[in-house]
Amino acid sequence: MTALEPLIQRAADSAPLHGVRKTWAALSERAQADAALCAEYDAKLFEPPYDPLHDNCLQNATLPALAAAAFLRHSGTDRKTRGLWLPPLLIAAVLGETPHTLPYHNNLHFRKVLLHAARLIGAHKEPLPAKDVALLLIAACIHDLGHDGSGNVEPDGTYTPGRLERRSVEYAAPYLKAAGLDEASRADLETMIVCTDAARPDNPACPLTQMRAAAMVHFGPQQTGHQPGAGGGIYNTLKARRDLALLALFLHEADIMNSAGVSCAQTGLETTQFKQESKGDQARPSDVLEFLGTICRGGFISEAGRTLGQNAYETIRARAQADFENGNAPYESEPGEQA
């Protein structure tokens, strides 16, 4: 971590993201404790069989410790290769620890997404190259960087695909460039992160819709007819690049896993937090059904995603449907554990 300090300082002079130096100083003070936590996290969080994840599992974690533990577990043993990719990953993790205090898009969300990304890597049948592991974990750290609680749809209905996501990439770019991340990798990172835009999944221009259409070509069951979202620029890019399509798909599935693939209680909590952030309304089972229907669309596409989350997804969907039919009562502000 000490070796990153000059990179942090140099990039921070020209970067638009606030609070990086202060975050770096706080993380530096606990670097020794984080080194010990890396070993604990490696076994507790990244080794199957997994216990259902609860928010309090990650309250005392830091993103750099989680990222380092995940990367060292999945990046092979070549020290030179690790040395190339660890600096940009750790810088991304520092950025993801800058204060984000929204009800949903907060620092805890970044930790959850990174954790699930690492678990998807572990559940994948073949080891990923160290570069792909690093890019996926970097994307998890910064995919909602600087989120302001708004969406990509203006009050007048105007939809700007990937607006917030591209801004996250812009915030991180000076730091990643200073850490040696090449232009092609930064472009791939932007494609992956833009594909987490789920603001208008009914719109063919929606990056998530295009990504899922391309993922179905590579990883889904045999389909006939035209896939919704096929034909757009992101779709064409990912259709031509199976490796990048897998990383974009894993990032998306990691992003939704805590809301759709853990437990009914966790889904209730995540939905409540999201509604508090976006509209201030009470969350109801109908909101869960809308999320599962419009964004998840039947669940997980990748084999690793289905292994980790599909059974829970089906249970969550059935429970939300039953609760909807039984009155659609709002969730508690702090939902308790549910069967």
Image (cartoon, grey):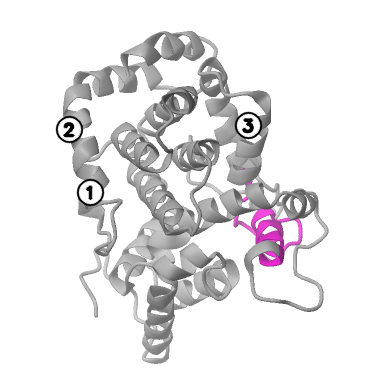
The amino acid marked with disc number 3 is Ser
Q: Please report whichever mark, 1 or 2, sits nearer to the chain's N-terminal start.
A: 2
**Mark 1 and 2 residues: CB-CB less than 8 Å, in contact?**
no
* Left or right of 278 in this view: 227: right
Residue 43: assigned label? 1
Please tell me how crowded label 2 is: few (under 14), some (14-19), or many (20+) other residues with Cα within 10 Å.
few
Instruction: Name the N-terminal-most of marks 3 and 1.
Output: 1
Kind of residue at badge 2:
Ala
User: Please, what secondary structure does the residue beneath circle 3 have?
Assistant: helix
Residue 185 marker = 3
User: In front of the other: label 3 or label 1?
Assistant: 1
Q: Residue 76, image x and y in percent?
A: 42, 38
Q: Position of residue 187 (x, y in %)?
A: 67, 33
Q: Position of residue 327 (x, y in %)?
A: 37, 88
Image quadrant where one finds the C terminus: bottom left
Residue 48 quadrant: bottom left
CA separation, marks 2 and 3? 31 Å
Residue 199 belongs to magenta span: yes
Where disc 1 sits, the SS reads: helix
Is residue 92 shown in magenta?
no
